[in-house]
Amino acid sequence: KLVAHLGPLPVALFGCAAAASCYAVLIAGTELPFFIVALAILGFQWNFLFVSGSAMLSSTHTKAEGPKVQACGDCIGSVASGTGMLCSVSIVNGLGWQSTQILCLALVAVVVFITLAMMHFSRSRKTTHTAAKQSPP
């Protein structure tokens, strides 16, 4: 209902804010309380980004194509998650804990930039489309 009320892009931005908060907590410390707080925030982040991403993905195709596209998107997401999990030890060993979290923050910044660009182009397209409808032939 949140995506239907606010739209998928603002929900995605909220998910990105939660992700940035999660990584900031992980940068702050490596003791158990930090991990507990980070995992709680991670749960919100995952849900917001997954739901908004699914809504954006399903809105780009017809209803007949929707289930196939959704299944393909879920498969790609699962493969990416599995690959990330398998590579995580090497990444943390190579970069270190703090650098890995900073890299994650940089990736979140890229997603925020893309989401804001999508919001800008979506608004400008709606404005252009509305203006074209209102102008006399």
Image: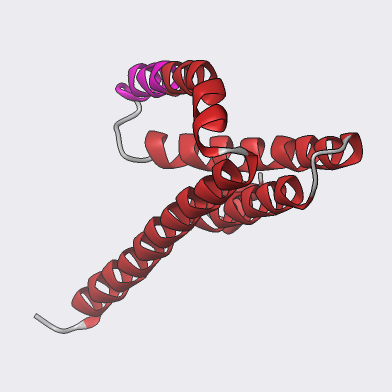
Q: Residue at x 70, y 38 (%)?
A: 42
Q: Principal SS element in the magenta part?
A: helix
User: Percent x, y for residue 119?
Assistant: 40, 64
- 133 or 113: nearer the eye? 113
- 123 or 17: nearer the eye? 17
The residue lying furthest to the left in this view is: 137
Q: Residue at x 72, y 35 (%)?
A: 43
User: Percent x, y for residue 54?
Assistant: 48, 34
Quadrant (top left/top right/bottom left/bottom right) for the N terminus: top right
Quadrant (top left/top right/bottom left/bottom right) for the C terminus: bottom left
Q: Is residue 40 above or below residue 28?
A: above
Q: Is residue 19 left or right of residue 68?
A: right
Q: Is residue 31 left or right of residue 113?
A: right
Q: Is residue 9 above or below residue 97?
A: below
Residue 75 belongs to magenta span: yes
User: Percent x, y for residue 23?
Assistant: 66, 48
- 105 or 123: nearer the eye? 105
- 106 or 51: nearer the eye? 106
In magenta, the rendered stretch is 64-76
The residue lying furthest to the right in this view is: 33
Residue 109 belongs to magenta span: no
Q: Is residue 13 above or below residue 76?
A: below
Q: Is residue 82 above or below residue 91?
A: above
Q: Residue at x 35, y 18 (%)?
A: 72
